[in-house]
């Protein structure tokens, strides 16, 4: 049975009262089914029109091609199942990799932060060292000033004691 581009059946199929469907089966054009005799002449006429009668019904494909088509259909279903399973595995893999990449990114940022702290630690130590050195210098200067003041006070004390001694000796 040949179906044209407009979807209409060929005249020989129409005269037989059959219409081809897209899945390769034929259906009756009339609302009530006609009785077909299973004579050899009817089978030959159907075969001549390209319609093959099997126990499953009328088909446009020969039985060998129909079996191959069915096998291919089953293989396609199986392949689609494998493809779906593969897609699920890929989705799981992607989800796992995304979660791991987030963990890695977090750890990377922590490492960068620690590296920056280590780099800054040298500068902090240098600054603290300079601050402590300045404080030491200030304390040394204060110590020198206080030592000088102490020496001066000792001299003044000695001079005052000498003056008191001299004055006490002169009065006597």
Image (cartoon, rainbow, N blue to C red):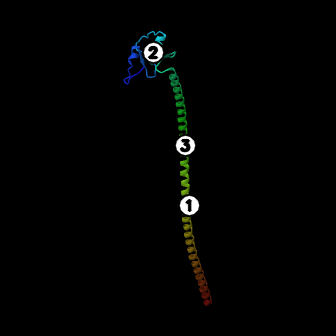
Judging depth in this view, the residue of 127 and 132 nearest the camera is 127
Which of the numbered marks, if any, corresponds to residue 121? Answer: 1
Q: CA distance from mark 3 to mark 2?
A: 61 Å
Image location (x, y in percent) of residue 82: 55, 32
Crowd around label 1: few <14 · some 14–19 · many ≥20 (10 Å): few
Image location (x, y in percent) of residue 172: 63, 90
Q: Earlier in the sequence, mark 1 or mark 3?
A: 3
Q: Earlier in the sequence, mark 3 or mark 2?
A: 2
Circles 1, 2 touching at the beta carbon (< 8 Å): no
**Quarter in which the N terminus is drawn:** top left
- Which mark is nearer the camera, 3 or 2? 2
Residue 145: image quadrant is bottom right
Task: Tell me the residue that label 2 is attached to.
Answer: 46
Question: Along the horizontal axis of the image, is 14 left or right of 151?
Answer: left
Image location (x, y in percent) of residue 142: 56, 73
Residue 162: image quadrant is bottom right
Judging depth in this view, the residue of 37 and 125 nearest the camera is 37
- Which mark is nearer the camera, 1 or 3? 3
Residue 46 against residue 74 in the figure, above or below: above
Residue 172 against residue 6 in the figure, above or below: below
Task: Tell me the residue that label 3 is attached to.
Answer: 97
Crowd around label 3: few <14 · some 14–19 · many ≥20 (10 Å): few
- Which mark is nearer the camera, 1 or 2? 2
Look at the numbered disc 2 and give the secondary structure of its residue. Answer: helix
Report the number of discs. Answer: 3
Judging depth in this view, the residue of 1 and 58 nearest the camera is 1
Residue 141 against residue 75 in the figure, above or below: below
Q: Residue furthest left?
A: 6
Q: CA distance from mark 1 to mark 3?
A: 35 Å
């Amino acid at each position: 049975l040949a179906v044209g581009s407009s979807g209409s059946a060929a005249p020989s199929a129409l005269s037989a009262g059959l219409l081809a469907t897209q899945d390769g089966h034929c259906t009756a054009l009339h609302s009530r089914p006609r009785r077909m005799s299973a004579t050899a002449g009817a089978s030959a006429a159907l075969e001549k029109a390209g319609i093959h009668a099997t126990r499953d019904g009328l088909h446009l494909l020969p039985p060998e091609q129909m079996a191959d088509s069915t096998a291919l259909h089953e293989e396609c279903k199986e392949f689609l199942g494998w493809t779906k399973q593969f897609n699920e595995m890929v989705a799981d893999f992607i989800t796992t990799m995304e979660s791991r990449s987030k963990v890695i990114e977090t750890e990377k940022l922590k490492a960068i932060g620690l590296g920056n702290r280590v780099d800054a630690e040298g500068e902090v130590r240098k600054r603290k060292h300079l601050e402590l050195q300045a404080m030491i210098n200030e304390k040394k200067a204060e110590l020198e000033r206080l030592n000088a003041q102490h020496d001066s006070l000792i001299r003044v004390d000695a001079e005052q004691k000498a003056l008191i001694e001299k004055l006490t000796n002169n009065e006597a």
